Structure formats: C-alpha cells, structure tokens
Image (tube, rainbow, N blue to C red):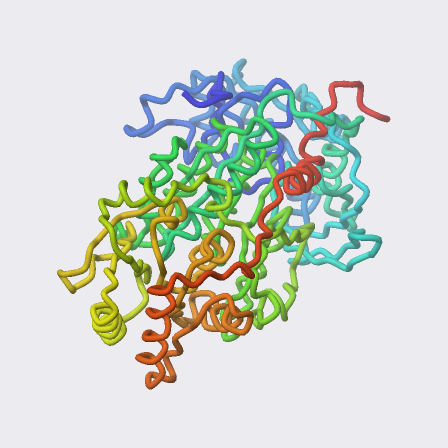
Amino acid sequence: MMPGEAQRRVGVLGPACDPFGQLLEDQPARAHDLFLPLISPLPDAAERSILLDEILVLSQNEALAHLPALLQSATPVTLILRRNTLQQDHTQTEAALRMLATALKASPADHIQLCALTPEAAQYCETVTGLPVSAAPALRPVQRPETSLPLDRSQPQATFFLDTHQMRDVRRIDTDALSWGRLRRLARLHATDPNDQDLVDLCAYVSTYGPAVLALPRPRRMLAVVPNGVGLGHITRMMALARALRSERETEVVFWCFSRAAEILQAAGYPIVLRQTAAHLRAHPPDWRDFETQEFALLLQTFKPDIVAYDGAMIDPFVFAALRMPGCGTCAFLWVRRGMLSPDADPLFMENEQFCDLILEPGDLAVAVDRGPTRLHQAHTRGFCQTYETQPVSLAVTLPAYSPREARKRMGLRRGIYCLISLGGAFGDWDALEAALVAEAKRQKITLIWAQSPLAPPPRNQNTLIRRLFPLSRYLPGIDGVVTAAGYNSFHELMLTYDKPVLFAPTNHIRMDDQVARASFAATQNWADVLQADTPEDITPKIRAFMQAVKSGTRFPQRPKQALEATALNKRIDQMLQPYMGHASQEPET
C-alpha cells in the first residue's frame, strides 16, 4: 500500500487536460480522492468492478452528451456549469444551459448537484437555468507568486517576465504545458480577453493566497523515472541523487524503471515499479503511451510525490501527459540532464524545459570542451524553469571501497597483476581492440578481467576472466589498471576515486554524449590516455605503454576530487519546492 492511499473514487467525465479537472486535488475535501477518467457514466464490463463514490462532469456540454446515462446513474453526480469561451459564444452557452435545465426539470434527479466556478458564475447560471447552482468549493490557499502570467486561449504560447538571479528574463510557455495545479503556484494568472468568461472564472477561482508553510509535515517523496539507456549512467546518477537527498532529510524514493539493469536498484533496497518500453513489448507506440500515461497517473495519485525526477535527454511525452491529469499536478518536476552531448545533436529536445521547475545538470570534469547544444543553445520555450549545475555526480564517491585484499577475495583473484576491461553494452565492434589487449597483456604477463555490464553480452574470448561488479568503485583497489569507455558514469567514477592507470576507448555516437572530447580532455590533463578510432596506427603503441604503466604500478595523484555536495543540493531542491509547500492553513488573503 502506497502512502496517501485514496479514500474516495471520483470518476471524471471530460477532457483530461481541462483546467478545472487539474485543480480538483486542491479542494481540501478532495485532497485524498482518486480521480479516474471516464469515457461514459455507465461502466463497461472492464470497469464494473470499480465502484465510484461520485461522478464529476466538467461542463454542461459533456453532461448533454451523456445525459440519459447520468440521469440513470445510481452514483452521486456533480455537474460543473461553465460560462462562454472563445469557441462557444454567449448565445451558444445559454442555449446549452437552457437545454440542460429543461431535461433536468423533466426528469428530476436528486443525485445531480450543479456547481459553477465562482459566485458570479453561479448566479449567472442560476438565472439562465432557473435551478439552484452553488459555487465550487474554494481551493486551498497557496503562497502568492511574484510572477504574472497573461493567458489568451487564442494564442498557443504565453509570454511573461521571470525574475532570476537579479535579472528579468523574457520567457515563453505553451499555454497547455503545465497543469493549472502547478500554474497557480508559479504565477498569478489573468485572462487578457474578457470575452473568454470561462477563462476569467478560472483565473479568479485559482487566486486564493495565504502565507507559505516553510517545511513539509512529512518526509519528502520523490518519484524517479529511469529510461532504458545503453549504459548504467541513468541508474547510478539517480541513485546518487537519492542518496544525497536522503543524507540531509528523510526522503522516500520510488523508481519508475525501464532499465534492464533494474536489479541494481532492487539490490540497493529501493522500491521499483518495473516497466517495459514499447520496443520491449513490440507494442504500437501511441497505444503504449496512452496505457503508460494512465498507469503513471495512478502512481502519482497514490504515492503523491513532491518531486518527479527524470534522468535523460529525451523525455517521453507520457510523463508530461500524466502530470496534466486530474489529481496529478501539484508536484515539482526535476530534469537531470547532463551536458557534453554530441555537437551534432538536435537541440529540439531542449524545448522540454518549459515543463520543468529545475534542470539539474551534473557537473562534468571536461566541461571546458563541451560543444553540445546544452552549452551553446537555449530553448525557445523555457517556461518557469531554472538551471542548477552541480559538482560531478558519482555514486562511487558516496560508497566505501573494499581493501585491496578484500576486493581480490570477492573477485576470486589470486596473486598477480590484473587489468579490468569495461567497454559497456553498446559500443560497436571491438574485435581489433580486444585482440590487441589480449596480445599485449599476455606479453606483459598481466591478467585481463572483463567487467560484464548487466546490459552487455560476455566477451567472445573465452580465455578472459568475467566478473559482474557493481558498483565497480568498491572493487577498484584490487585492480591495477582499467580500459574503459568514457561515458559520464565510468569517466567520473574512475577520475574521482581511482589513482592507477586508465586507458579510455571512447565511442562517438550522435545519440550519446561526446565521449571523444571527454576522454581527450583527460589526456591533456595527464589523468589518463585515450585511444582514437581515427588513428588505428596508435592503438598498439598506446596499449603497450599503458600495460607497462600497469605493470610498474604507476600512480596518478593529480586527478581531481570534487564531487556532488549534498548540503548545497538539498538547499536548491528546497528552493524548487517552495511554491509547492505553500499549502497555507490560515485564512486566505482578501
């Protein structure tokens, strides 16, 4: 059973992105309700086992489309009457209201209650229908935002000013990017067109402010989404983030995990919700995305996280779609997005910034040579998002290592000199490199160990020792040298915690980070050597020099030591959460 399990089940009839539906959880009496989207008031065979406590209809138009079923329903119905929009003028709105009133008067139904967004709207609807209409329950007060956001539903984007770092930025956001539960915490909303009376009503309805509450009355909760990457970087960064948050304050972390290496999270004791991608299931992507949206929304409502965090460049739209559904929209969104992407990477993915509260960019020791889009481009639609660049994030720094003797014992190694090969799970055909390593190691009387990733097949050379080592850093004291790819995780794990010879064999793929630039930077700093794919004639001499360094026990004390600072991170996370913590219990301001 998840914390905050719902007490009532409310079926919602209307668009999932309707602004009023996105505000339901801010009605105090509905704070623990579970909101379920309905296609029809009468359940089909698959839904008959779900007993509803209430059906909530988001507009008179939706009610007219399903009126016979609503009249027959044995479940209490709350029907929200709306004033005119730009798409439905005053005359059309009144016609729909009168049609509804005629039907309700002809078939009295005591189980149907009529509401409108504001007292003024309720009075208007009551006059038109001749039926009693009450104002919707007031929303819980939130801290009054400093930013003002003008809204016009005839415009796909809104432009506003956001004060950041003693500067005033001009920002843009798609008008439907965020749920209104989040919007009311981030900005004072006002309708620019008085003819859109429904939008005027919505803006008035959300404007309930009070003093901020400065501390959460319970542990922080984070729902961490981990995509299925080609390496372990997504998992290890999110684990490092979780450990940093938990080191300063009690924090519950649940992982929504697509990675094939989910066993790592399970072994570390984290609750996981194991998912499958559309490719894994061979499913039609739109159908898979709809299903994933519903499942993710259900967990958002039951776990009620303060933070949804995502690590990766390409955020699947199901995440943002779920955050706009009823009952899912009052948490902050943290995007963990590393730099050092390929210079050829399309910067379009950066437009996801508008959905975020904070971009946490894990620091990179090679940032001086970053020529990727996150360094050289800026999103057109940034919304309310801000950026925080940390020191390098590495799980290895937070974990104690074994002694050399214990590490070798756990790896089942005897006396001798050992070199670890860790080339990851999707780095191309390394036949030539593997052959050169085997030949030179044999000549130098060095034993090779292949570190098998949970995502990678074993090496084809059956004479190589194979070990599954996670986290690798704990075993490094028993290893005399490492040959590895230069992904973010491997690079920083070695540069921050290891002082023996390292030889980088970077890959260069447009979908991945710029490993060649990162490894080359390390070489210029004399932290390690690097094999370049475009100079194959250098492979054998560099491997020979590396193996000689391994055999002679060369050390590299000049490697850097800086790493993620938990106190500074928690302070910045608290700043991100502040608008969402302002659930004031005091009387609202007038």
Residue 535 figure quarter: bottom left
State the residue in front, 256 or 423.
423
Q: Position of residue 238 (x, y in %)?
A: 48, 44
Residue 126 seen by the camera: no
> Residue 339 versus residue 581: which sits nearer the camera?
339
Return the residue found at the far right.
Answer: 590
- Residue in view at x 42 percent, y 36 percent: 39
Q: Quadrant of residue 31?
A: top right
Q: Residue furthest left?
A: 462
x then y, percent, for residue 182: 65, 39
Residue drawn at 51 percent across, 21 percent down: 4
Q: Is residue 169 visible?
A: yes
Tag count: 0
Indicate the quadrant containing the N terminus: top left, top right, bottom left or bottom right: top left
Is 317 placed above or below 73 here? below
* Relative to 42, 6 lies left or right: right
Q: Residue furthest top?
A: 110
Q: Nearer the viewer, residue 118 or 451?
A: 451
Residue 382 image offset from top left, x and y in percent = 66, 57
Residue 370 vertical position relative to residue 392 in the rendered view, above or below: below
Residue 384 % position (x, y): 69, 50
At x 55% / y 32%, what residue is drawn?
A: 246
Residue 177, relative to residue 53: is it above or below? below
Quadrant placement of the C terminus:
top right
Give the residue drawn at x 29%, y 45%: 408
In the image, 479: left or right of 361? left
